[in-house]
Amino acid sequence: NNNNNNNNNNTTGQWTRILTPPPHPPPRCAHTAVYHNDDIYIFGGECATADKYHHYKDLWKFDIKKNTWEECRSRGGNPPAARSGHRAVTWRHYMILFGGFHEALRAETRWFNDVHIYDFQSSTWTELKYGKLARLPPPRSACNMALCTAPTEALFVTGGYSKVKNANAPGASKSEGIMHVDCWMLPLKSLVNAGKGGLLNGAAPPSWERIARKGEYPSARAGTSSVLHKNKLLVFGGVMDSEGDHHRMQSVFYDDLFALDMERRRWFGMRLKKASSGGRRRRKKKNEEDAIEEENNAENKVDIESDDDSEEDEDESSAVNNEEAVSNGWDLDQLRNDMFAFIDGDGNVVFEKIEEDDEEVGDDNSKSMVKDGEEEEVTSATKSSEPSEKTDTTNSVEAQLKQSNPHPAASQPVSKPTEQIAASSVMKVDDKGLPTSVARQTPLPRINCATVIRNNTLYIYGGVLEVGDREVTLDDCWSIDLNKRDKWTCIWTGQMHRQVWKGVDSDNDSYISSDQGGDGNEDSDDDMAEFEPIIEGEADEESEEARKKAKKAAKKAKEKEKRRGVKYEITELKEKLGVDNEQRTPLMGEAVADFYARTTEYWNVEAANSVGKIAADRGDVMSTKELKREGFHLAKERYEELKPILERLTELENMQLESEDKKAKKKAEKKPKKDRLR
């Protein structure tokens, strides 16, 4: 989370930080930002740090000419509830806001499908309220939304993510994530017509219309980035998550580009065009331009016209077939092969340990992979058969490394686990044993990158890519000419390989580490003590200070993981407790007598339906006093049954309060953690 402003000069390719006087909006992420009359308006978002998670519902305006912030106070109507992951667009002198989610520690996460409209002129909010029988888009966050101006003004919403309750869902969460693939359209012109200069004024809001998926549409995914271009919604990247046993997520990341033509209501795949011979290409282009001119659609369809021969005309063929596009995303295996080296919290190079298939690899020993309990082939200038004194029966990769090369010289290259992953299409290991970037022809797959269009050129910047439990924040910048669409151009390669990853101990031990100058004297209970030094050498004061800071950050990350565990345990216990039924659930700290007094009527009815019915079958009639006594016994049995859960919940609540108090005391010296992505 950050409240800094940065501006990129597209002519010089330089970033400039914009310094602004107070007041400033609090740091946040997952908010919306729209442009109107030389002002940028941001709404909502979340502040997510190791100790704080808060949703905002404030609206701020940034004056581009004056470089000043101002909070916009509502003068009428009800502002939207606090949320993040929502979407917003400008239409005439209005801002239209849709969707989002709100997460709270002591309540279930809520997703929204409401529509709120902010009038820039009157500073008032208007909510479009629908009846229970109205057909609406399902609640969601992180969707793609854009404004279409022809043939009529309309709002388009597609994709997004949410969770729904499912009693058959795996695990204890009883909920499952949904990658939305539907598309909805909301006509806007009637809003102003019905209001006679305002909005609605008592008239019914316009109806949502679901749009059928036609053309070549993207596969189900979340975390896509989108931008509007000539009544076309361009969508890039995304990820498809599938949850397996023990809540393990299998993710596939994408790097493809699609366009939703909102006039024709059809999807198109935006692949790179293949080069073809000049003469035939010119004739093909001429014929297509003539045909398009006859349809009066040339201006708005430049990005789906084809300059290639008929057998290479991918866009036109996709326009005929209505089917999901075949997207070759990057799964975990490919990500680990291409992104095989990281820098850990102690400044060590961490290599992925990639398992081989059951099939034989072949005679080439230099390509052997690390397997549990097997010796590993390590490329190095010096080797020794002297066994290591350290033994480890729990899949100790570092022990295998020491057996192969216990004392390499400090001046030699860092030992690599295999030659097969010494280089890839993304990175390679240099002579010093450090990962370095490799020039690419296309952007890496990613989620939630920044997108903007200028002069028919699409620019993408940054985003996030995950390799197992490692989250890699990208800062590269790419562009593509939407008219030619013949190649991607890398404007800035970024500094991905200089990042420090601080979660070495949480990815199923799928790594081997090479210490870049460590002294190997860390305590055994240290987070990084499981990595033995491979290169001996003296570290300078600067690197020593960096290691101390990284070690401290690693401990903070461990505390953060502990807090997440507490939160998850609270959720599980509440589900076991049955918090949805207050009559059967004691409150935390509530005595059994107070519990019965609060729910007397419920338990007396339960007693009458159970014990009272049995007595009636025998011909006996229980008095009111006897029914109350039996009702109290039932309530007490329920209380004793849930007592251990209540005690554990109380303990967890106290742990959270203690953590919050500790955080409040250190708030002045606390540094914000990396943004939490939604």
Image: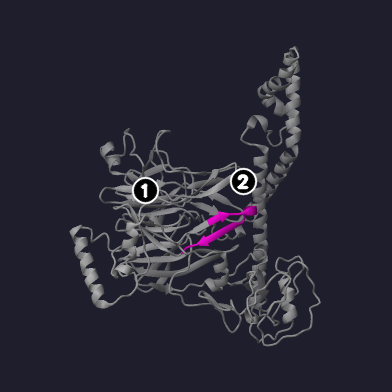
In the rendered structure, which segment of residues is drawn in magenta?
241-254
Q: Which residue is mark 2?
A: 173
Residue 345 position in % (x across, y down): 64, 69
Q: Using the image as rendered, state which of residue 213 and residue 479 is in the foreground.
A: 213
The residue shown at (26%, 59%) is: 300
Residue 145 highlighted magenta (yes or no)? no
Residue 249 in magenta stretch: yes
First reached walking from the N terminus: tag 2 or tag 1: 2
Residue type at mark 1? Ala
As measured in the structure, the alpha-carbon distance from the residue carrying label 2 to the one carrying label 1 is 32 Å
Residue 527 occupies quadrant? bottom right
Q: Nearer the viewer, mark 2 or mark 1?
A: 1
- Residue located at (50% from left, 56% from top): 27
Q: Callout 2: helix, strand or loop?
A: loop
Mark 1 element type: loop
Which residue type carries mark 2?
Answer: Ser
> Residue 623 location, x and y as percent?
74, 13
Q: Position of residue 368 (x, y in %)?
A: 65, 77
Residue 586 vertical position relative to residue 375 in the rendered view, above or below? above
Residue at which label 1 appears: 212
Q: Residue at 65% of width from left, 86% of height from top?
A: 412
Colour logic: one colour
Say if residue 61 shows up in the picture: no
